[in-house]
Image (cartoon, helix red, strand yellow):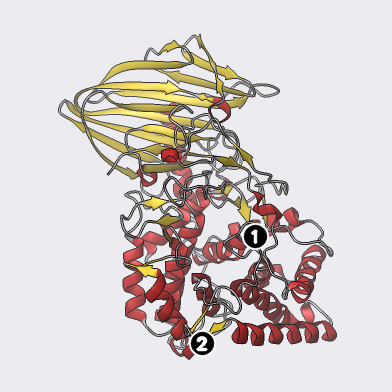
């Protein structure tokens, strides 16, 4: 594995925050407290922004894996002097199991070094840098602990090796003899108005965290195809869930570039309404029923009572709306890719696809939602009415173009989804005149998309009305039931999009996109399966699933020429795409009617375990 790549990292999570650990045993990213909090280790974005490494002193090779059914990472270093294992975990609260994991995580990073054979000289380098590298902490020795305090953050490190602090960092060397252990426990707490950081016993904490992850996975029995890949992706999505609210962030990092050296670098540590329906469907597919209910409850609270004002397209993990961007000029960026940003100004945009995403999620969950709570009833009615009102307006689209709006075909299709689901709800959501109004608008949207979204020259639906610009987003049309996958124009669109935007099975969003966008390729898998090309669909799925890193993790994008993963990491949308594509493949194999129907079922109820 080449050092320094985005995919070189493993992912740890505790239901509130995430850490990234590279194959050399260095924690290069941790924002304790919540996903979008300031980092204490930020070397991912600048070499001077803090890290914590534990590794052999000499040359070594590496093999690593997650402990079965967990996000607890085990890295084995092989050296000329012997072998040593490093186990890394973000801790759950003691005794938490099943759906209670992560609700009250102690904000503790645990690292355990175990000698497997021989006697391996080891080195650790502890270099915290608070608030995205801005602040160097005072390191103070207190009995068997090393305390780092600066500004609003406090870290307490307990270990059984002697650390030598100097100038805001500390190092130690030790020997990992066969059969011995050296444990390190790092606790975080705010500096003020909070107890001191917890530093629990490392062995017990790791064992308890392993048991917590396995208990959660044991409550979710997925019975479809590609079970191993789906379970791993479900664990990743769960790891990206802020457990106190139930919100799933798009990623746990900021400003990892779509193109090396490029400036399309954004903060993804927030929750997009666009992802909502895809996320719920993926959770449903993977039998995470309680998470589905928590997700919808979170969205209702985040949106509040909606009237005529535009619906926000994204939120913070607790439902915050103002996510104004700030540039961090002190950071040089991942491999010199600047700017580094926190916040995301996409929150200001109009994105009309969110009407369909939310209504589709409600339709999917209707057995759980009905009879409607008055707040849910009001929200769904307003969304349907706003789709009627706004579908003719241009927007920024699902790819969030900045500074310009267009009539995006995918946004119009999602407005159709909102109105179609409202009509299906019928008198459970509106009076006869309301349903008639929604139906009329739905039919008008459909006719307009079929006319203005089609390019005779390309023989394809395109990204923008009356243009010849191809866009992979049109592949959602069969997946939401707008068109059959075997409709002649849809088949032609699939063929043209694949011919012009695909390289080696990896699909770009548009011509000129710097890298392939992972979920687009999984959309193509679903389209092929629904169009009757089952063998091609399975072949493409397996090829895509093999593109993960050695730990089963996807970034947002993949360079189709080099295979290098790019963009924020890990990416929920990519793993959600895998889960949903596996679900479509399962549906098509198990229900022969779908092979002639050309679109997915409007509703499904997986068997509960």
Label disc, if present, on residue 273 of the rendered structure: 1
Q: 566 and 276: which one is in front?
A: 566
Please tell me which residue lies in front, 369 or 128.
128
State how far apart marks 2 and 1 are (Cα). Answer: 33 Å
Q: How many marks?
A: 2
Q: Residue at x 50, y 75 (%)?
A: 475
State the residue in front, 406 or 303. 406
Is residue 223 in sight in this rendering? no
Please state which of the two labelled residues, at mark 2 or mark 1, is closer to the viewer: 2
The quadrant in which residue 586 appears is bottom left
Identify the residue under disc 2: 456
Q: Is residue 499 above or below residue 89?
A: below
For mark 2, give the secondary structure: loop
| Residue at position x 32%, y 34% in the image | 24
Q: Is residue 425 depicted above or below 285 in this figure?
A: below
Q: Is residue 443 above or below residue 356?
A: below
């Amino acid at each position: 594995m080449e050092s320094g790549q985005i995919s070189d990292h493993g992912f740890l999570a505790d239901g509130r925050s995430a850490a990234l650990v590279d194959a050399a045993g260095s924690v290069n990213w941790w924002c304790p407290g919540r996903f979008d909090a300031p980092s204490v280790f930020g070397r991912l974005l600048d070499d001077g922004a803090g890290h914590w490494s534990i590794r052999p002193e000499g040359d070594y090779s590496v093999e690593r894996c997650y402990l079965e059914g967990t996000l607890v990472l085990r890295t084995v270093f092989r050296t000329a002097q012997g072998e040593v294992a490093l186990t890394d975990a973000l801790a759950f609260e003691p005794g938490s199991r099943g759906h209670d994991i992560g609700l009250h995580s102690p904000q503790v990073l645990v690292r355990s070094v175990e000698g497997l054979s021989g006697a391996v000289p080891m080195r650790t380098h502890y270099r915290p840098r608070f608030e995205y590298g801005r602040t160097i902490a005072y390191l103070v020795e207190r009995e068997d602990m090393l305390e780092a305090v600066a500004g609003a953050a406090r870290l307490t490190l307990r270990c059984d090796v002697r650390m030598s602090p100097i100038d805001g960092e500390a190092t130690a060397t030790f020997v990992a003899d066969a059969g011995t252990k050296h444990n390190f426990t790092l606790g975080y707490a705010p500096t003020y108005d909070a107890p001191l950081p917890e530093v629990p016993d490392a062995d017990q904490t790791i064992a308890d965290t392993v048991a917590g992850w396995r208990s959660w996975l044991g409550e979710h029995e997925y019975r479809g195809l590609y079970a191993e890949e789906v379970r791993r992706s479900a664990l990743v999505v769960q790891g990206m869930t802020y457990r106190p609210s139930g919100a799933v962030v798009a990623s746990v990092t900021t400003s990892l570039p779509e193109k090396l050296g490029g400036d399309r670098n954004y903060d993804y540590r927030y929750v997009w309404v666009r992802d909502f329906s895809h996320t719920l469907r993926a959770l449903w597919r993977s039998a995470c029923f309680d998470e589905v209910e928590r997700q919808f409850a979170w969205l209702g609270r985040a949106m509040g009572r909606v009237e005529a004002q535009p619906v926000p397209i994204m939120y913070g993990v607790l439902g915050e709306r103002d996510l104004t961007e700030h540039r961090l000029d002190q950071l040089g960026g991942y491999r010199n890719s600047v700017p580094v940003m926190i916040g995301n100004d996409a929150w200001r945009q109009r994105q009309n696809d969110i009407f369909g995403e939310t209504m589709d999620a409600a339709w999917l969950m209707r057995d759980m939602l009905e009879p409607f709570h008055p707040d849910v009833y009001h929200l769904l009615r307003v969304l349907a009415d706003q789709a009627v009102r706004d579908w003719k307006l241009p927007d920024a689209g699902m790819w969030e173009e900045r500074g310009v709006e267009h009539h995006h075909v995918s946004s119009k299709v999602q407005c159709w989804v909102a109105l179609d689901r409202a009509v299906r709800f019928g008198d459970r959501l509106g009076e006869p005149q309301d349903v008639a109004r929604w139906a009329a608008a739905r039919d008008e949207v459909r006719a307009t998309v079929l006319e203005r979204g089609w390019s005779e020259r390309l023989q394809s639906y395109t990204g923008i009305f009356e243009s010849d610009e191809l866009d992979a987003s049109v592949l959602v049309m069969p997946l939401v039931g707008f068109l059959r996958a075997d409709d002649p124009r849809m088949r032609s669109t699939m063929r043209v999009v694949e011919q012009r935007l695909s390289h080696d099975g990896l699909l770009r969003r548009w011509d000129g996109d710097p890298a392939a966008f992972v979920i687009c390729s999984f959309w193509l898998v679903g389209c092929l399966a629904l169009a009757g090309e089952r063998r091609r669909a399975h072949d493409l799925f397996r090829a895509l699933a093999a593109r993960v890193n050695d730990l089963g993790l996807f970034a947002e994008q993949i360079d189709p020429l080099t295979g290098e993963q790019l963009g924020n990491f890990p990416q929920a949308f990519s793993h959600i795409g895998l889960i949903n594509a596996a679900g479509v493949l399962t549906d098509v194999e198990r229900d022969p009617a779908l092979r002639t129907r050309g679109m997915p079922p409007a509703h499904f109820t997986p068997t509960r375990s």
